[in-house]
Amino acid sequence: MKNASHVASSPIFHGSFVIERRYPVPPERVFAAWAEPALKERWFRGPPGWELYGRSLDLREGGSETLNGRFTGPPPLDTRFTARYHHVLPARRLVYIYDMHLNGTHHSASLATVEFLPDGAGTLQRFHEQVAFLDGTTADKGVPSREHGTAVHLDCLAALLAGGQR
């Protein structure tokens, strides 16, 4: 585990990525899957080998979200996601910031923008993340990992919206 003095002396590395997904349902349904706790918990969660400790969701301007859990390892890894919603336009877009902590160390800080765009009878969802890695993780390693994890979440969202589940 990296300690606070290590993080303070680590350089900051930046990166960004965009992921687009098309869903065969209207923007209101896609937005609801982000906004309603019972729906979001079905697609926004850790992968196999990850245990949930706690979660909360208050999706409104000024609201927050948390997701805490642990990879059982070896070695075990505690994760803490904390977000604050800055702009919420139902069925149109979200802007939020979030922090990731790994084993108590502040790993990264991100700005995420999610757009829900009408696309025929469905929705084009555009997810754009700008991330600063605070613990010495380099962008060439951190960004592909973050993008992959986000893509897995969005694949789970697609399965939920299609009536299936991971």
Image (spheres, rainbow, N blue to C red):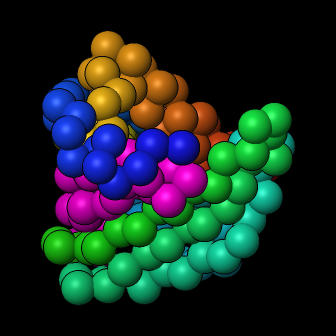
In this rendering, the answer to whether 121 lies above or below 101 is: above
In this rendering, the answer to whether 7 lies above or below 38 is: above
Identified at 28% across, 22% down, the residue is 139
Q: Quadrant of the C terminus?
A: top right
Measuring from the top left, give residue 20's x and y in whole percent.
36, 32
* Observer-nearest of 38 and 68: 68
Identified at 74% across, 65% down, the residue is 52
Q: Is residue 104 visible?
A: yes
* Observer-nearest of 89 and 10: 10
Q: Quadrant of the N terminus?
A: top right
* 98 lies left or right of 46: left
Quadrant of the image occupied by residue 92: bottom left
Identified at 66% across, 47% down, the residue is 77
Check the image and name the residue furthest to the top: 140
Identified at 56% across, 67% down, the residue is 67
**Magenta region, residue range:** 89-112
Main SS, magenta residues: strand
Q: How many marks?
A: 0
- Is residue 96 within the magenta segment? yes
Q: Is residue 131 visible?
A: no
* 141 lies left or right of 74: left
* Observer-nearest of 165 and 162: 165
Measuring from the top left, give residue 108's x and y in whole percent.
32, 46
Measuring from the top left, give residue 75's x and y in whole percent.
75, 37
- Is residue 111 within the magenta segment? yes
